[in-house]
C-alpha cells in the first residue's frame, strides 16, 4: 500500500527529491547546458535516467554543501565541470 500524498517524508528523502527536481528543471531549461549533456552522455553509456539524476543530485548537493561551509556563492563553473566528469563523483571535503 502506498503512502498518501500528504504523508510526511523524512528529511533525507525530502532533500533528495528536492535536488532531483532542481536537476529536472536544469535539464528542461537547458541551464546549465552541462545538465542535458551529462544526461545524454550517461544515457549513451547505459545508465538509467533515475541513476543519472541521482548522480547529478549528488554533485549539486556537494556544491551546496561547499557553498554553506565556505560561505561563498554558487560556483557554476565548478558545477558544470563536475557534471561533465560524471560518473566520477567529486571527492568529499575533509
Image: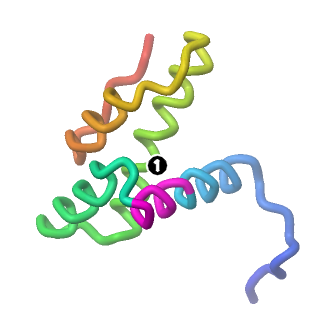
Q: Quadrant of the C terminus?
A: top left
Magenta residues, as a range?
Answer: 22-29
What residue is shown at x 16% (from left), y 60% (from top)?
41
- Residue 43 picture quarter: bottom left
Tell me where residue 12 appears, x and y as whole percent. Answer: 67, 48
Q: In the figure, is residue 83 to the left or right of 19?
A: left
Front residue (pair 19, 75): 75
Tell me where residue 57 appears, x and y as whole percent. Answer: 46, 49
- Report the label total: 1
What residue is shown at x 25% (from left), y 54% (from top)?
38
Task: State whether the magenta stretch is mostly helix, strand or loop.
Answer: helix
- How is colour applied across the structure in the image? rainbow
Q: Quadrant of the N terminus?
A: bottom right
| Residue lying at the far bottom of the rendered structure | 1
Q: Is residue 71 above or below residue 90?
A: above
Tell me where residue 49 appears, x and y as whole percent. Answer: 34, 70
Q: Is residue 85 above or below residue 29?
A: above
Q: Is residue 24 above or below residue 83?
A: below
Q: Residues within 10 Å of mark 1 (few under 14, many from 20)?
A: many
**Magenta segment includes 65:** no
- Residue 85 picture quarter: top left
Residue beneath label 1, please?
57
Badge 1 element: helix
What residue is shown at x 40% (from left), y 23% (from top)?
92
What residue is shown at x 36% (from left), y 48% (from top)?
32
Q: In the figure, is residue 70 to the left or right of 77?
A: right
Tell me where residue 55 appears, x and y as whole percent. Answer: 37, 50
Amino acid at each position: 500500500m502506498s503512502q498518501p500524498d500528504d504523508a510526511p517524508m523524512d528529511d533525507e528523502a525530502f532533500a533528495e527529491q528536492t535536488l532531483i527536481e532542481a536537476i529536472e528543471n536544469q535539464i528542461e531549461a537547458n541551464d546549465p547546458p552541462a545538465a542535458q549533456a551529462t544526461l545524454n552522455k550517461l544515457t549513451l553509456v547505459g545508465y538509467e535516467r533515475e541513476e543519472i539524476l541521482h548522480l547529478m543530485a549528488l554533485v549539486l548537493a556537494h556544491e551546496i554543501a561547499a557553498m554553506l561551509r565556505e560561505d561563498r556563492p554558487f560556483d557554476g563553473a565548478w558545477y558544470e565541470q563536475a557534471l561533465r566528469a560524471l560518473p566520477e563523483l567529486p571527492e568529499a571535503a575533509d
